[in-house]
């Protein structure tokens, strides 16, 4: 399972590293230390926390901008069918859902907790593996 540094987690959550550290210190998001002593957040824990955070946010916390229609975030759900798949990404306060082939999900290695970017063009959402 992929883990994220506090800085990476902060970027995915759309907050400062200091805010992410305070949340970790307060026990809002679980961390562990690697061999080098860096604090890491398990991808699945970060995915669950990002969904919880988005649900608890107020209207004032929502950003209505994106850079070139790219939404970097974390995969929070993957539903696989025989041929098609549904992938959900939490990008800060934004929840994006994309339908794509099962083969694409497997080739990209998309699973809950993995960093990915949703790219929006017209009515389509494309997902890039980070």
Image (tube, rainbow, N blue to C red):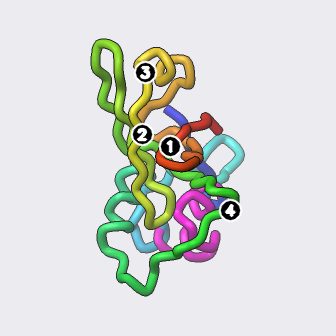
Q: Quadrant of residue 83?
A: top left
Which residue was labeled with disc 2?
Answer: 98
Q: Which residue is mark 3?
A: 101
Q: Picture coordinates of residue 118 (x, y %)?
A: 55, 46
Task: Label 2, secondary structure: give it.
Answer: strand
The residue indicated by pointer 4 is: 67
Question: Is 4 or 110 nearer to us in this picture?
Answer: 110
Q: Main secondary structure of the magenta part?
A: helix
Q: Is residue 87 above or below residue 80?
A: below
Image height of 117 relative to 60, above or below: above
Report the Cα–Cα distance between label 3 and label 4. 26 Å
Horizontal arrangement in the rendering, residue 15 relative to residue 106 (left or right): right
Which residue appears at 53% of the width and 52% of the height? 73
Q: Residue at x 49, y 30 (%)?
A: 110
In the rendering, at what x and y percent does residue 125 appear?
50, 43
Q: Residues within 10 Å of mark 2 (few under 14, many from 20)?
A: some
- SS class of the residue under badge 4? loop
- Give, as a single range, the part of the protein colored magenta: 8-23
Which residue was labeled with disc 1?
125
Residue for point 66% across, 41% down: 35
Q: Are marks 4 and 2 in contact (CB under 8 Å)?
A: no
First along the sequence among labels 2 and 1: 2
- Crowding at dot 3, Cα within 10 Å, few <14 / some 14-19 / many 20+, comes out as some
Q: Would residue 30 be found to the left or right of residue 80 on screen?
A: right
Kindly state the secondary structure of the residue where label 1 is placed.
strand
Residue 94 in picture, x, y percent from top left? 44, 62
> Of label 3 and label 1, which has the lower sequence position?
3
As drawn, which residue projects farthest toward the bottom? 60
Residue contact at pointers 2 and 1, CB within 8 angstroms = yes
Judge by depth and name the residue closer to the eye, 112 or 61.
61
């Amino acid at each position: 399972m992929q883990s994220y540094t506090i800085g990476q987690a902060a970027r995915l959550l759309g907050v400062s590293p200091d805010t992410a550290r305070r949340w970790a210190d307060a026990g809002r998001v679980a961390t562990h230390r690697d061999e080098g002593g860096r604090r890491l957040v398990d991808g699945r824990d970060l995915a669950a926390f990002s969904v919880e955070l988005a649900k608890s946010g107020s209207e004032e916390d929502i950003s209505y901008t994106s850079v070139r229609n790219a939404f970097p975030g974390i995969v929070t759900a993957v539903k696989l069918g025989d041929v098609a798949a549904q992938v959900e990404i939490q990008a800060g306060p934004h929840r994006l859902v994309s339908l794509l082939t099962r083969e694409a999900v497997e080739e990209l290695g998309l699973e809950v907790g993995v960093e990915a970017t949703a790219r929006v063009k017209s009515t389509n959402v494309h997902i890039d593996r980070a």
